[in-house]
Amino acid sequence: MALDLIVEIGNAHEGSLGIATSMVDMAAKSGAKTVKFQMHLAQHESSVKEPFRKKFSLQDSNRFEYWQRVNFSFDHWKRLIDYTVAVGLEFLCSPFSLESAEWLLSDGRIKRWKVGSGEATNYPLLDYLIDSKLPILLSTGLVSWDELLEIKRRFENKQAWDRVTVLHCVSMYPAPLESISINILNDLSSITKNVGYSDHSGRVSVPLLVYSKGIKTIEVHMTPHKLFFGPDTQASLTPEEIEMVVRISEEWDVLKSSGATRDELFNSSSNTANIFRKGTYWKSNLQRGHKVSLNDLVFLKPNSEIEAREYEIVLGKVLNCDVKQGESVRKSELGKEW
């Protein structure tokens, strides 16, 4: 199974449909197959008292205003979905309210859900997503282990746990390497066979390391540039870095699938071997009747009728004709006792 790389655009578009579609193009060019956005309906999600995690905006007084500014109208959401599908990518979107989930499902083009870790304990939303019968990607950055087990029981009671991919996630932006805690992937594998990873490190090495451990579903944030505006820029990869992740993962897949024997590999490079390996040549002009010794031979490329590894079979043989310096030794030049 190949890498299932989810490129999180989130709200990096800053409410611009133009920027959003250009970032879809960037993701497509990088080789990704899925892009993910976030649908924030401020009146259904937040209050004016919600503080900024990181005060980055010069124009929004609080997160409520920020959600209002960066969210699209439903008409623009449809246009964005149209564009993403036309480019050939899967459109994925995290709902942050029941109302946003209802609209996304009604559009009919959502194939699976991504639940941010802040919504992982929003049981009314989870119940709705479960009832949709679609697969669910569940981030765990903001839940404890006991809460995760409780969530698991809730899904199991609804016979839906096998539809869930649990994503290890560190909710720091950016997440320092010493906090990534790859070991948690093993912990998650003890409660589900569907384990993934959502990255906030902003480093190529982390998703590649995770992929090398057999994790196929990996989410990374994308920014057009490391100096681009936004709260998640430093936790994101550039399109060029995402392209590197895709390319290296594909190369690893080829490497892991290769399994030729030594003889098969030798046969496939036999022409090269004949160029690189050495044959047996005459070191000087010799006359008929001469008894061949090691001093009469030199070993040169390319390979010849008598390989250097076979030179001993020539020793002691008597020439039945004159031979010239620099010519390869031929069996027909040697005596009857050959």
Image (cartoon, rainbow, N blue to C red):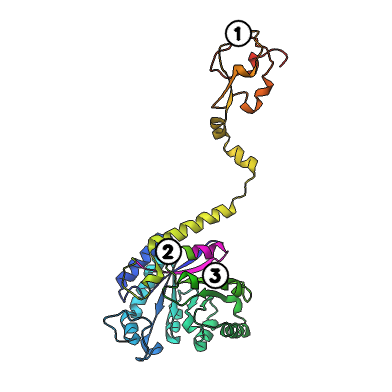
Check the image and name the residue furthest to the front.
295
The residue drawn where x is 69% and y is 16% is: 316
Q: Which residue is mark 1?
A: 287
Residue type indicated by callout 1: Gln
Tell me which label, 1 or 3, sits earlier in the chain.
3
Type of amino acid under label 3: Ile
Report the front residue among 224 and 162: 224
Identify which residue, 307 or 18, lies in the foreground.
Answer: 307
**Residue 20, quarter of picture:** bottom left
Mark 1 to mark 2: distance in Å? 75 Å
**In the displayed structure, would residue 42 be above or below residue 81?**
below
Q: Label 2: which residue?
A: 88
Bin the neighbour count of mark 1 within 10 Å (Cα to Cα): few under 14, some 14-19, many 20 and up.
Answer: few
Q: Secondary structure at mark 2?
A: loop
Residue 56 position, x and y percent, is 32, 79
The amino acid type found where label 2 is placed reads Gly
The 10 Å Cα crowd at callout 3, few under 14, some 14 to 19, many 20 or more, is some
- Residue in the picture at 50% in, 58% down: 249
Mark toward the start of the polypeptide (2 vs 3): 2
| Dot label at residue 182 | 3
Residue 216 magenta-highlighted = yes
Q: Which residue lies most toward the left here?
A: 59
Identity of the residue drawn at 54% across and 32% down: 276
- Residue 250 located left or right of residue 21: right
Element type where label 1 sits in the image: loop
Q: CA distance from mark 1 to mark 3?
A: 75 Å
Range of magenta residues: 207-224
